[in-house]
Image (cartoon, rainbow, N blue to C red):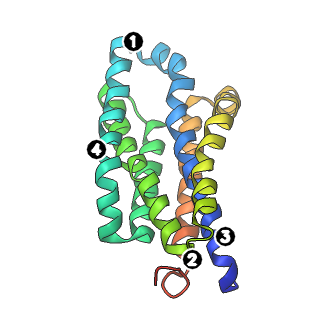
């Protein structure tokens, strides 16, 4: 792996991470009718599920920046993607309202740190001349994830069932994590 390509590989991974975060959070909204039918969750209970995500996401969005500064972007973003990938996969095996609330809260904790982690990573890997472009690409993954999520989730849930709509993105997140941890950090990043 040549050193001059590493920043762009890191950027591609950031694009995938922000895309995956927006895909993962939409799985529930696309599959909720099937889940409500199976578990008899009311619309009010679904509201509590969404609130659990939003509270943890909002908290971690703020705290996540501090954690990235403390742990560094490699470890911080690895923890974030690891937490939300596990949480997403747990949605696929949940069997009660309370489990869904807990797993949704956990998903928000992981995803809330994604954008602070992406911003810090871009700062570490790109100089002032390319930082704006790199940030646009990194954050642009979120838009792509939001666009492809509904048809992809419908396709998966129609063929494999709603549970696999959570499990497959979780597995993708775990693969992302392995690749992220493999990348050599340190002298290759701009900040060091």
Residue 163 lies left or right of residue 9; in this view the side is left
Q: CA distance from mark 4 to mark 2?
A: 29 Å
Q: Which residue sits at x=53%, y=58%?
A: 174
Categorize mark 2 by other alpha carbons within 10 Å: few (<14), some (14-19), many (20+).
Answer: some
User: Is disc 4 surrounded by few (<14), some (14 to 19) or many (20+) residues within 10 Å?
Assistant: some
Q: Is residue 88 above or below residue 163?
A: below
Q: Check disc 3 and report the residue beneath it.
A: 8
Do the residues under discs 4 and 2 have CB atoms within 8 angstroms?
A: no
Residue at 46% across / 56% down in the picture? 81
Task: State the image coordinates of residue 154 (x, y, percent, origin top left).
Answer: 67, 27
The vertical placement of 171 against 57, above or below, is below
Q: Earlier in the sequence, mark 1 or mark 3?
A: 3
Please give the name of the residue rendered at 42% of the width and 56% of the height, measured from the top-left corner: 116
- Observer-nearest of 69 and 57: 69
- Residue under label 4: 59
Mark drawn on residue 43:
1
Q: Earlier in the sequence, mark 4 or mark 3?
A: 3
From the image, state whether disc 4 or disc 2 is nearer to you: 4
How far apart marks 4 and 3 lie (CA) works out to 30 Å
When the figure is inspected, residue 73 is found, relative to residue 192, above or below; the finding is: above
In the image, which disc is placed on residue 183?
A: 2
Pick the front one: 188 or 84: 188
Residue 103, image x, y percentages:
36, 38
Quadrant for residue 68, please give it: bottom left
Secondary structure of residue under mark 4:
helix
Q: Residues within 10 Å of mark 1 (few under 14, many from 20)?
A: few
Mark 1 and mark 4 in contact? Answer it, CB < 8 Å.
Answer: no
Q: Mark 2 or 3 closer to N-term?
A: 3
Q: Is residue 56 left or right of residue 83?
A: left
Q: In what element is the residue under mark 1?
A: helix
């Amino acid at each position: 792996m040549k050193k001059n390509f590493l920043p762009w590989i890191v950027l591609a991974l950031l694009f995938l991470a922000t895309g995956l975060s927006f895909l993962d959070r939409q799985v529930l909204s696309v599959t909720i009718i099937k889940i409500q039918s199976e578990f008899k969750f009311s619309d009010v209970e679904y509201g509590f599920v969404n609130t659990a995500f939003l509270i943890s996401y909002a908290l971690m969005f703020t705290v996540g920046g501090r954690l990235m500064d403390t742990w560094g972007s490699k470890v911080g973003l690895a923890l974030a993607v690891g937490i939300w990938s596990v949480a997403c996969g747990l949605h696929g095996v949940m069997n009660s309202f309370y489990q869904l609330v807990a797993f949704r809260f956990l998903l928000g904790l992981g995803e809330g740190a994604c954008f602070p982690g992406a911003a810090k990573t871009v700062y570490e890997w790109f100089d002032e001349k390319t930082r704006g472009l790199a940030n646009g690409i990194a954050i642009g993954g979120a838009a792509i994830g939001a666009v492809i999520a509904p048809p992809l989730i419908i396709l998966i849930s129609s063929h494999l069932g709603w549970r696999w709509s959570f499990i497959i993105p979780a597995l993708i997140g775990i693969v992302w994590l392995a690749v992220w941890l493999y990348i050599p950090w340190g002298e290759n990043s701009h900040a060091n």
